[in-house]
Image (tube, rainbow, N blue to C red):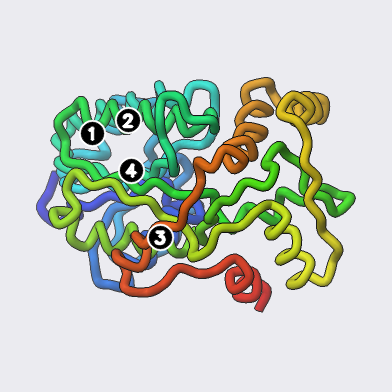
Amino acid sequence: MTENVPALAVTGATGALGGAVARLLAEAGVRQRLFARRTARLPELPDTPVFAVSYLDRAQAVSALQGVHTLFMVSAAESPHRVEDQQTFVDAAVDAGVETIVYTSFMGAAPDAVFTLARDHYATEEHIKSTGLAYTFLRDCLYQDILPTFVQSDGVIRGPAGDGCFAPVARTDVARAAAKILLAPGEHRNRTYTLTGPAELTMADVAQVLSTVTGSSVRFENESYSDAVATRVKSGAAQWQAEAWSSSYAAVAAGELAPVSADVLDLTGTPPLGFEDYLHQTRR
């Protein structure tokens, strides 16, 4: 690998989070290389080499990662084999000589987390730790960005969230925090950060904010976990996916996605966006 190829790599750069991080780094004058499965969709940044990379293809990943010192690893898309795919990519990073991985995990990641996909994140964290590489884990709460998609066609948010609270975070705030870490990865070596918004909300609160900002009537209707899984399977979701979606609500009910963390403010020096502010910002 020639010396003029950047030693910082950003994965998932065609996505909302990876793309935002890449743009922030470019604005800061940091050279980087961008990874994606489909390079044609990558943001066009000056003097930025791009590589086609799949987490599933270890040989391809090892080649692309040659000379990388710091790797921003956006978690792979949800799938039944996400843990295996991510472990393959981590192993490729080890083979290529990567020194530090900054990984986007999930709030409350644990082997017994209520949210089934948080267990996948925990398994990936543990695998990264087992390699001996330096790491930084960003444990994000649910994204504010996806909350409007929870509203069904009849204007109702349904799920087994009960009166539980959670602290959703704007994806832009996660990107800002990640960029700050990538500018000085050594200062965040072997640290875990929990990234949340500024307030705890119930799903009923989310519905009320959506109603206020959009002018459409939105309400929350609690349902049992078994009913939630059954209705999602009936609508075409695979069993594992229906359980994942339903368990995200159940994690809210269990209090696993609260309380508010100060890590976004501490990392960036700027408070995170509240949900209502985020909605107003995106509707401009």
Q: Amino acid at mark 3?
A: Ala
Left or right: where does residue 154 sit relative to residue 233? right
Which badge, 1 or 4, is on the more N-terminal residue?
Answer: 1
Q: How many residues crowd mark 1 within 10 Å: few (<14), some (14–19), many (20+)?
A: many
Task: Look at 23% across and 47% down and name the residue there.
Answer: 191
Cα separation between marks 2 and 1: 6 Å
Cα separation between marks 3 and 4: 12 Å
Asked if residue 40 shows in the view, the reply is no
Q: Which residue is mark 2?
A: 89
Q: Which residue is mark 4?
A: 103
Tags 1 and 4 touching, CB below 8 Å:
no
Secondary structure under badge 4?
A: strand
Q: Which mark is residue 175?
A: 3
Tags 2 and 1 touching, CB below 8 Å:
yes
Which one is closest to the eye, mark 1 or mark 3? 3
Q: Which residue is mark 1?
A: 93
Cα separation between marks 2 and 3: 21 Å
Task: Look at 62% across and 35% down and name the residue there.
Answer: 250
Q: How many residues crowd mark 2 within 10 Å: few (<14), some (14–19), many (20+)?
A: many
Q: Is residue 29 above or below residue 254?
A: below
